[in-house]
Amino acid sequence: MAFHSLSPSALDKTVRQLEEKVLEGSWGTSTRLPAERTLAELMGVSRSTVREAIQRLVSRGMLETKPGSGVYVVQRQPARLSAPWLQLVAENPPLRSETLEFRLVFECAAARFAAQRSTPQELDKLEAILLKMRNAVVAHDVDAEAVVDGEFHSALTAAAHNRMLDQFYASVITMLRDHIAANTFDATVNNSNAVIQSTLRLGQHESIYLAVRDRNPDAAQQAMFAHIAFVGKQFDPGFHQTSGD
């Protein structure tokens, strides 16, 4: 089946930009958004486009309007209130292997679509994230590497321009970021090959980015598959990877 690239409207792009700022923490909980005029100037769109984008996010429960005060980021509700199935996941955390299997389906699709639909600005963002990841790996800064790893996968999903993926990712983003961070830490503790493996993971992220940049959906999907498979192998008994797959 052939998937054709989408050309998001100015409204769709504005919704996505606002959504990213909320999901990535640029605007914290209960933060008041800048005025419509300011947002319109920053995003290069009309005030009416900003106003409609805000209303869409209000309807999704991400923002709220307070008469006479402005627009605010909504305080996150407990999983039990927003999505009953998330409460089940919280009460019965999936195994690492189960989460990796989920990511093989979800993130391989996101990588494929990002190769078809990402904007120049999104490619620039991915490249900037990779630079931070490279600096963290060189400095052997596991904390920074774990954080930036999560940023990369979040930005890649946003670049896929698929609302269903966006909404689903938003609902599990905390769990997935915790999963990614735990993988990074656990693969480093008491591991004589930790530096080599960090370098390999960096190279895998770079391969994903290059495939997306080159508009090669098959290569992007395969690079993501190889990365997640490698992450899983790190926890196999006796795994001592010293070179790429």
Image (cartoon, grey):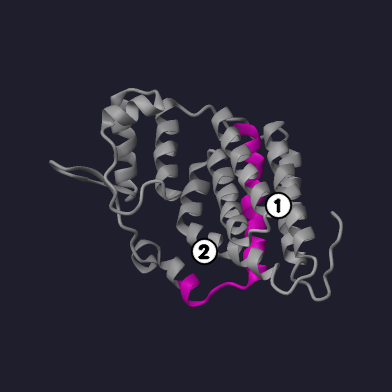
Please name the residue shown 34% across and 59% down the image: 76
**Residue located beneath label 2 in the image:** 175
Circle nearer the N terminus (2, 1): 1
* Extreme residue toward the front, this view: 139
Boundaries of the magenta span: 88-117
Q: Please count the marks in the image.
A: 2
Which x, y percent locates residue 164? 50, 47
Q: Identify which residue, 125 or 51, lies in the foreground.
A: 125
Give how far across and how far down residue 185 sits, in percent. Answer: 64, 67
Disc 2 from disc 1: Cα separation: 27 Å
Mark 2 residue type: Met
Q: Is residue 231 above or below residue 87?
A: above
In percent of the image, x 50 and y 71: which residue is there?
89
Q: Quadrant of residue 171?
A: bottom left
- Please rate how many residues cluster around mark 1, counting C-alpha atoms within 10 Å: few if below 14, some from 14 to 19, many from 20: few
Which of the two marks, 2 or 1, is nearer to us in this view?
Answer: 1
Please state, as top left, top right, bottom left or bottom right, where the N terminus lies in the image: top right
**Magenta span has 115?**
yes
Residue lying at 84% horizontally and 63% vertically, measured from the top left: 241
Residue type at mark 1 is Val
Instruction: Give above or below for 141 relative to 214.
Output: below
Magenta stretch, main secondary structure class: helix
Query: Which numbered dot is residue 138?
Result: 1
- Cβ atoms under marks 2 and 1 closer than 8 Å: no
Horizontal side of 142 relative to 204 (left or right) equals: left
Is residue 151 rendered magenta in the image?
Answer: no
* Residue at 53%, 38% in the rendered image: 161
Query: On the rendered structure, is 128 left or right of 212?
Result: left
Q: Residue furthest left?
A: 68
